[in-house]
Image (cartoon, rainbow, N blue to C red):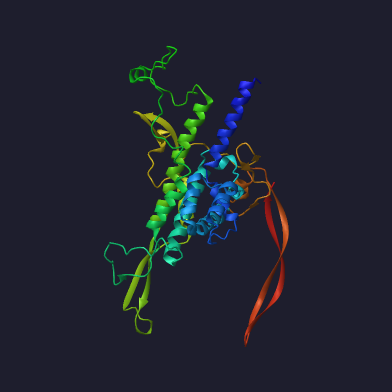
Amino acid sequence: MSRKMQLLVVLLLIVCWLDQADTIRWLALKKTSFKWNATGAASAMCRKARLQYGLARRQTKLCRTSTQTMPHIAKAAAQTVTTCQSVFADRRWNCSSVEMAPSFTPDITTGTREQAYVYALSSAAVVYTIARACAAGTLFHCACASPPRDPPNGNFKWGGCGDNVRWGSQFGKQFTDSAEKRGARTEPRYNSRSTTERESGRHRGGRRKRKGGEDDMKPPLSPFFTKNRFRSALAAVNLHNNRAGRRAVESSLVTQCKCHGVSGSCNIKTCWRALPTLSEIGERLKRKFTVATEVISRRVGAGRKLLPASSAMGLYNEDDLIYVTKSPDYCLRDARVGSLGTRGRSCNTSSHGYDSCEDMCCGRGYSTISVEKVERCQCKYHWCCYVQCKICRRWVDTQECN
């Protein structure tokens, strides 16, 4: 290999690392035990978070100016991982790769359907934790949400302390989108050639573009051009999925009420808008994951847009998830695509869904293992005041994929 090619490979590896640095590496904050409220330590902790836990440059700046929000960001990172693993526990991809933050496997960095979900869920988690923190009074920058403008529909009045989703969404946009905005470009970057030359398609060497315009699937002249174009499209996809996650939180608000009156009567009822659990929002995004749209970057006029890869898919809206790379089947371990495989995973012989042994084990079969379970049983309450139980042992058959 020539020295020029070696330098090219090294530069490409650096670009690949930078691409990964601009992803959701901040999820590694779930591992931190920082005392963010310590006096005078904010700058040092934010710098450490950038070096060790993957904060992007703009996120680090936001960390320094809003240090009191960082415990909630760390909480959002932890909730993202636990919620994702809970929601996808019955799938081949069970969100294990998110545990590896800040070093992710390719299935979370190449624009797959799984990456779309993780981005949307993590964005939603930031909005969720900040909105709840505002209502709980643990953030000085915000307070309870303003009462809805809509008149009360029923025998109640607006009051209480609603979750401040509006403020949480504004902060979440600043935090989660900041790592992607540098790479997202909707307009092509031209060199110093004249407009006439660009329109005619002439290059310095006298060559013309192919008739019919630029082919989106044609390999470009330089591998760096390929990387830059993919990076730009991927950043735009990530920004879209971040927004879809925030919108999922905004549309999940429900009305909660409290009754007031003599002897528990409900003569007066006060209501406010509150969020459900993050797991419910995760389930909502999971339904979006199932019908996510594959997109491709195409030239439209003077810029580029993300359009459905197939006309049969139809158009997508702001609430939908989108992706640019097809997912692996996750059946076998393959480090090149980020698949951990399903060998050793539990499956359900009586199920016909995603957790069935037929689907989970990918046709490789399964082994039945007997496991002894020890649990409390035949519990009795004794006056006064304790509960006495016996210890029961039973054998349970479990199935694991070969």
In this view of the protein, can residue 293 be seen by the observer? no
Q: Residue furthest left?
A: 151
Question: On the picture, is 397 further left or further right than 103?
Answer: right
Find residue 173 and report its horizontal and vertical position in percent: 42, 49
Say which of 334 and 394 sits in front. Answer: 334
In this view of the protein, can residue 57 be seen by the observer? yes
- Numbered-mark total: 0
Say which of 319 and 105 sits in front. Answer: 105
In the rendered view, tell whether residue 286 sits above or below residue 306: below
Say which of 15 and 217 sits in front. Answer: 15
> Residue at (67%, 43%) from the top-left corner?
364
Find residue 74 and report its horizontal and vertical position in percent: 54, 56
Q: Quadrant of the N terminus?
A: top right
Find residue 305 and report its horizontal and vertical position in percent: 39, 34
Question: On the picture, is 163 further left or further right than 222?
Answer: left
Q: Residue furthest bottom?
A: 383
